[in-house]
Image (cartoon, coloured by chain):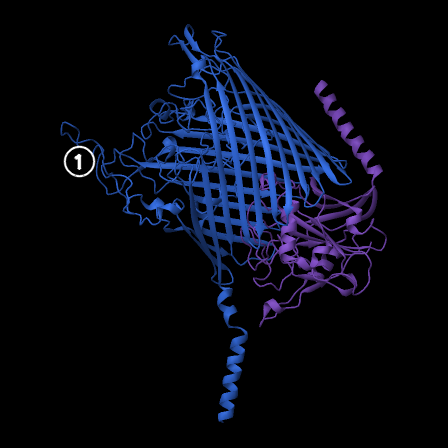
Chain colours: A purple, B blue
Amino acid sequence: MRSVRTVLVLLSILGVTGVAAAARAEGVVSLKDPSGDDNGPGSYVYPTDAVYAAGAFDITAFDVEVKGSDVTFKVTVRSKIDDPWDSKSWPGGGNGFSLQFAQVYIDTDHKEGSGFRDALPGLNVRFRPESAYEKVVLLSPQNRPRLQSEVAAKAGALKGAVVIPKSTRVQGKSIVATVDAKDLGGVPAKGWGYAVLMQSNEGFPASTDLLSRKVNELAGQHRFGGGSDWECDPHVIDLVAAPGKGGADEAKAQHDQLAYKCDANNPDATPKVELPMVYP
Amino acid sequence: MRRGIVALAVALVTSAAAVPARADLLNFDLAGRLYTKYLYRNNDSQGLVSYGNPFWTDNISGDNGVGTEFELKVFGKVSKYVQAYARLQSRFGELWQDWWENGDYNASGTNTSGESEGMNHASYIKLRGTWVRLQVPTPSWWTHTLTWGSSDLGMFNAWTVGKVRYIDRDNGKGIFINGNVKQGFFTYDLAMIAMPKLWVGPWWSTGIGDPNLSNPFWSQDWAYGAKLNVAPDWGAFTLISILTNDVEVDRTDPDAVGSTYSTCKDDLGNPIVGCSKDNAVDTFSRFWNSVTTLEAQIDPLDWLSLNTFIGLSVQGLDDRLTANGVEQNQGVSPVVFRSTYKDFYKNADGFAFRQRFDFTTPVGLGVKIEYFNIGQEFNAIFGARREADVLLTEGFIEGGQLPTLNLANEFIDFDEAFVESCIGWHGATIQPTYNVSFPHGTFEVAAEGTLFSYNQNRQNRDVDKVYPDFLHSDGFTDTDLYDYANTTDRGRDPRSVYRRNQDRLSAIGVLNLKSTLDFYKGIDLGLKGKFIWDRDWRSHLTVDDDYLGKIVQVRARLGVGLADGLQGELGVQKDWWFENGRKGTLVTSEDGKRLVSVTGYNDDETQKLKVFFGLSYEYEGLKLRYRFEFLDKDQYREPADRNQHWLVFRSKASLEVNW
């Protein structure tokens, strides 16, 4: 009986602290994404290794909160986030998860021609002219020095847009990254646009990819399948599509946005798919 | 006409130039890797790996050397549904100073001929792994693949078939079926795995080296595994079952090589009834081990996760086909020795149960709670041997806990963690964590409290013939200065979970503080404190052999980003071990009920100071790592002339490129 009471007290404490914290934070964005659409343009499948648990890349929610001068980005997936490759033991230490790599692109001015259009290398996507971005926040299991080094080596032109969070951690099914508002150019405001793209962390990426895992025609032990062996397919497993309510039509919208057709004569020269942002 | 021919030729050349090279490359993907390791220490051993083979003497392990290995991976796309893979890799072990060794072995010892150290020092290229994979044409919601050849066996879990470590990832071979329905809602794996003749069974083999076998037979030794997984939105359920079966020939079969009845006549020349040759050889199972696990992961709420795990292991062995490794190998055996030849129900079996609760809150507070109870005879002979961890606790040593006697703390360097066996552990762990951020950084507190007893607690256990005690079952284990033969009192073997007299209770407390500061390229500060209280009342016949170990460990670490891709690390660790009754000799009457003598069991104290620093650098695909360690260890033992002292400087560096 005493043990039951102890558990109840513990649960109460956890619940109360959770509610208290929720009250302090100011939510500015809360988007939903349908589950089961972690298949890119509709055909992608997970790598075959057992670590890639069902739902590991299936975005179900995206939240932005402001707490003082901190802005937290929270990307939630369908399954509990594990750390099968023991990221804490990586050189310099990782962030407590291994598989996911979410990239949050932010359009702060919604002006055509303002900002960057190419996503970070490895994703094989661009943004539409009216959705060019000013900032991209990396929710990665890799530590800051590794991210800085990868960005410097592979995305030097976008370096000014990349925001590496001061902390990235796991909270159940969510990855929570905290950044200083000044690194975003200010506190998130109404009118900002967001594109939340889900990829997988690849610790041994190709020389042209920024820590992202390739999508091939056939799935491999550590390669997604259902795409192309060329670089004409978007390497995005899931994204949040407008209006961000979680409806089934958003899965179709995602499939349409990521639909691609490789140029048979020169596949790698195929124009990249162009994505819109969500303006909540 | 002529102009037309020229135009046609130009058109053909032009169109060919637009496509050609790609067509070949589409089917052929090459990946290369060069890895160089430097290893140095202030001693006189030569080689490229700190801890080599503990049983067979090898000529590649040692603390001083530099060597390089090359790897070439070839991926082929045979057709739309068929892929192939092969990996070629050079043997690691040749020192740069070897200059050249052609692989000839000279039994008289090392000389300057360049033909004396064998293939280990020849850097020869070896076919390390191959597979062919067929993806069966199926509807898009169902993928179904068949693989023939190499696998790292990662589809199972540490309790059943352990994932093979990265450098050995292609050694395991078999036939594998993998299926995935509805994007992971239902997955299945079926496997028929060629058992490693080198370690899965009594005497760490599937027959080789067993004194009872004159003609070991391993080519029909297979393991069979199945895994089913269902993953609804709110959790996952995984059922895994594995059976290893080591078969040997029936030596009474007159057709078998070395048969005791090859002529079907007894020693007096009389015909043996029922004995006749048929040019076929019968086989029996020498050793088998089956492990079945069921794991349920349930995530009812965003802030709550539950994990329930149940396991059962059963093993059988035939004492006609395997000698008693406990009795004949000084208690060093990966299996409990209990023959099931005449009585199946004498098998060694064990249950395992683990329950986890994982609470998280938006304010950065999280709590993990785990209850665990692993049976004293649970043993996963083919389970993970290293680089895995089945319990939350950090344990006595930091590398993880595994439910097998078949651990492999070998072929590792001084900077790699050891694993320990958790067979028989029964207790609970609580791990609260708290994260908070402030304007220029974050702060994280992680703690652990674990209290556990042992299902092996018993008096007068038979460690002479049944339960392997691995010869050294006393004292806190020193993994910094481990020696397999235990010539320097390095403490308990991490596999030693059985003791003749044990009544043990242990507690572990850990506090980790970590802060990251957002200055320049980032700064990490870490402080760790660990306390172990380990009590063993050992024999109930006397208090003179009682053990009380109090281990205190403090570690501080500073990590600094120095430039893009360049990171530095500096740390210091201090250990104090206070051990009352560390080890000694207890003699009792044959039935174990009367004390004859107690000697030793003195109070020892150990102090260790470790200072380390490291650098890692990545630039344009070049990866450099360096680690230096200074270690000063004093072991104060009674009487004082048994004191020991170590002063060690050692370092390891690596350079790696992949393309």
Quadrant holding the N terminus of chain A: top right
Residue lying furthest bottom in this view? B1
User: Is A262 left or right of A131, judged from the image as shown?
Assistant: left
Q: Secondary structure at mark 1?
A: loop
Residue holding disc 1:
B263
Counting from the top left corner in percent of width and height, residue B557 is at 62, 34
Question: Picture coordinates of residue B350 (x, y %)?
Answer: 50, 26
Where is the C terminus of chain A found, in terms of image quarters?
Answer: bottom right
Q: Can the viewer see residue B113?
A: yes
Along the viewing direction, whichever of B33 and B406 lies nearer the viewer: B33
Residue at the left extreme, as displayed: B269
Relative placement, left or right, of B8 versus B245 is: right
Q: Position of residue B512 (x, y in %)?
A: 65, 30
Q: Is residue A74 above or below residue B78?
A: above
**Residue A53 lies in quadrant:** top right
Q: Relative to A276, is B597 above or below?
A: above
Chain letter for mark 1: B
For the point 54% across and 78% down, the residue is B15
The location of residue B616, given as percent across then percent down, is 57, 45
Q: Amino acid at mark 1?
A: Thr
The image shows residue A20, relative to residue B94, as above or below, that is above
Mark 1: give few (<14), some (14-19) or many (20+) Cα within 10 Å: some
Quarter-of-image position of residue B201:
top left
